[in-house]
Each structure stands twice: as C-alpha cells, then as structure tokens.
Image: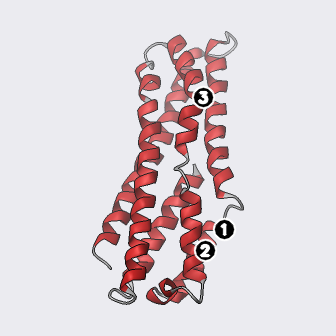
Amino acid sequence: MEVINLLTRAVKKCADVIKWGAGIQFDARKALVDDLQRICLNCNDAYDTVIKRLVPVKDAYSDNHKLADELRAFASDASTRDKFKPEHICGQVDHLLAQLSSNLDPLKYSVDLKRIKELRDNLRQYENVDAAIYQSYDDLTSELDQIATQIRDPIYDADERASYAKHVIADFEAELRSSKGSLREAKKQTVAII
C-alpha cells in the first residue's frame, strides 16, 4: 500500500528536517516534536489494530473454507476500516506543513527552509490523502473478498487461491510492520533533537 509508505516517509522527513537547528526556536521546535510524536503514536495504534484483526484470518490458513469466511469477515469489518486511518493523521501532517510554510510562524525559521518544499511535495503525491488511505484499504479488502469467493468456487483451485490469499496478507502485514518500524525510528530521532 503505497499510501502507508507515503505517510511514513512524510513523518520521517519531518524528523530529518528538525535535526537541523537544534536549540533554535525552542518552543516552536518542542511543539513540532510533540506533534510528530503524536502522529507516530496514532499511526502505530492504527496499524496495531489491523494487525490484531488479521490474527483470526491467519489462524484459518489450514482450512480453506474457514479462510474464505475469515477473509469475508475481515473485508466487511467496518470498525477495523475506520481504525486503519489514524484519526486526524492527514490533518496533523497538513497542519505541520502549513506551519512550516508560514512566514509568520516561528517554526519555519527553526528548520532548514530548503527541506520544507521537499516535505510538501512528498504529501502532494496524493490529492486527498484521507481518501487515498481508505481507497488503498478498500482495494485490499475487495481483493480479499474476491479471493474468498474464488476459494469457494469450484472452477478455481481452492488451494492455489488460499495460497495467494496468504501471500497478499503476508505482504500487507509486512508493510504495516515495516511502517511501524520506520515510525518508531522517526519517533526516536525526534526525542533528543529539540
């Protein structure tokens, strides 16, 4: 899911940018660090929720019909979908970038100005990041629902479709775990650079 990587890169870029200028505009930098810490925590919590929800799906790997049921249950789980997008994460990132762009905000003068454009460009890859997050999740759940249908359809090889489902889920979970690791690293980078 490219959008997960997009948000992770945006947070890491913010952390990289604030390394420069430690000691300058202390209050503004402290607020930025607090915001980045909150963003990392929100993302981590959201991804943990989805990883936890995948456990029953993975527990069903040994039984194709049960796997199909669990794939459908995951695909239709509106609660997990709602939690997948960390609450206000895109708004938080957009707010930070607006602060970094404002000539009246002291935060702008506490970071390397040449890097601000890089941050904004990174987020502009998607016109509407909120919608992109949900769209990427919906694409995944649609694919899992389709695989569930194919597992139960005799014209498909159920074992092959189940194997493919495992591959899709493993890739998705690996992406989430990688993002969590990157966010953890970004969070660690921000701790001591005020």
> Does residue 59 sit above or below 186 in this rendering?
above
Give the amino acid type for the residue marked by disc 3 in the picture. Answer: Ala
- Occupied quadrant, residue 139: top right
> Does residue 95 sit above or below 70 in this rendering?
below
Location of mark 1 (residue): 124
What distance separates the C-alpha of mark 3 from that of mark 1?
29 Å
Location of mark 3 (residue): 75
| Residue 125 x/y as whole percent | 66, 65
| Residue 102 x/y as whole percent | 60, 84
What distance separates the C-alpha of mark 3 from that of mark 2?
33 Å
> Does residue 81 sit above or below 184 in this rendering?
above
Instruction: Answer whether labels 2 and 1 touch (C-beta < 8 Å).
Output: yes
x 27%, y 74%: residue: 192
| Residue 165 x/y as whole percent | 54, 28
Q: Which mark, by number, is residue 120?
A: 2
Q: Is disc 2 placed on a helix, strand or loop?
A: helix
Q: Is disc 3 placed on a helix, strand or loop?
A: helix
What distance separates the C-alpha of mark 2 from that of mark 1?
6 Å
Give the amino acid type for the residue marked by disc 2 in the picture. Answer: Arg
Give the amino acid type for the residue marked by disc 1 in the picture. Answer: Arg
| Residue 75 x/y as whole percent | 60, 28
